[in-house]
Image (spheres, rainbow, N blue to C red):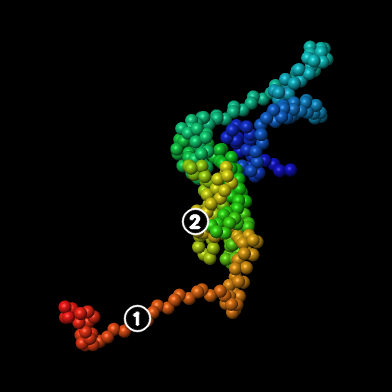
Amino acid sequence: MIRLHLLGFTPDLKGLVFSGRRGGRTGTYWVPVDDEFWKSLQQLEGTRAERAVAEPKPKGRRRKLTADELTLVEVRELLAGRRGSPAAAEQPPAAPEPESEPEPEKAPKQESRLSLREVQSLLREGRSVKDVADLAGVDEAWVERFTGPVMHEVRGVVAMTRAAYQQRARLGPSGLPVGDAVVRNLQDRKATQQTLEGIDEGWDARRTRTGLWRVRLRFTHRGKRRAAEWDFSKETREVHPRNDLARELGWWPSPETRAAKAVRSSSESEDEGGTPTRKRPSRKAKPAARKRKPAAARKAAPRKGAKRRSGR
């Protein structure tokens, strides 16, 4: 069985958020608080009280009962009719309970200048806990109680983005989802095993004011820190690359695309190997330009119409 540790509650106040490890700040589980939940808590409380009364008393020393247990004993005696009986009177009085230690003073309640919805909206936009605490006028610990549901939503957006299929102009949809396409393309680029193993930790997302989620993948390749970015819509489940690296890594050719490419490449190789191809019709040759006579010959030759004009 897995032991869970309580972090806080969901934004809609309908569930509790738990972490799988002690001291964790990221919520990994949540439990709805409904009628069945409250009924189970009441049954648990009643079973604990009955078990405390039914426990055998240790020999030689009388067990000290708490205030809740004493109340249950009195109720049981009243129902059994033993209250005030001689047998009950002969019993030695119970030892006085030691004075309880004063409860430590509780921290004063902090009044936030921001509503819970505003706090979580800022956290979704990628603002740090310190920045949100400064804006709200509260301690960072007060804000950290509400980071669990936000981180749970961020991981969900990243998972949906990695499962979406990216489109590419003139090539159609990818043959693999974004997450698998990134790994295949990095393998083709001879990425190191360390880079491939750290891919899962490099994903992150934040919500923009337009309603879209900005999903980013950071990794190291060939000694340089790189980042690929996509825009993702939770309503349509569509993903669009924002930079060239995301466009290249998030798309992988489908079997149909690879087959069409192989056919084109084979036809081109056959043309280069001597297969007769259809010739284009040749254009008609322009008539040769007529040679002009020398200037002296042009002056000596009589012009047409000169004799006719002289006869007139």
Q: Which comes before the other along the chain, label 2 or label 1?
A: 2
**Left-right relation of 61 to 216:** right
Q: Position of residue 182 (x, y in %)?
A: 59, 58
Mark 2 nearby-residue class (10 Å; few <14, some 14–19, many ≥20): few
Q: Secondary structure at mark 2?
A: loop
Q: Which residue is mark 1?
A: 289
Q: Position of residue 14 (x, y in %)?
A: 62, 32
Q: Which residue is mark 2?
A: 243
**C-alpha span from label 2 to label 1:** 59 Å
For the C terminus, give its image quadrant: bottom left
Q: Kindly give the residue lying farthest to the front in the view shown.
A: 312
Q: Residue at x 59, y 33 (%)?
A: 12
Mark 1 nearby-residue class (10 Å; few <14, some 14–19, many ≥20): few
Please, what is the three-letter code of the amino acid marked with disc 2? Asn
Q: Secondary structure at mark 1?
A: loop
| Residue 243 higher or lower than 58, as above or below | below
107 or 16: which is nearer to us?
16
Give the quarter of the image for residue 50.
top right
**Left-right relation of 102 to 226:** right
For the N terminus, give its image quadrant: top right
Q: Position of residue 290 (x, y in %)?
A: 33, 82
Please, what is the three-letter code of the amino acid marked with disc 1? Ala
Give the quarter of the image for residue 284.
bottom left
Query: Does residue 41 appear anywhere in the picture?
Result: no
| Residue 68 higher or lower than 259, as above or below | above
**Left-right relation of 262 to 229:** right
184 or 8: which is nearer to us?
184
| Residue 169 higher or lower than 275, as above or below | above
Q: Residue at x 64, y 43 (%)?
A: 28
Q: Residue at x 48, y 42 (%)?
A: 209
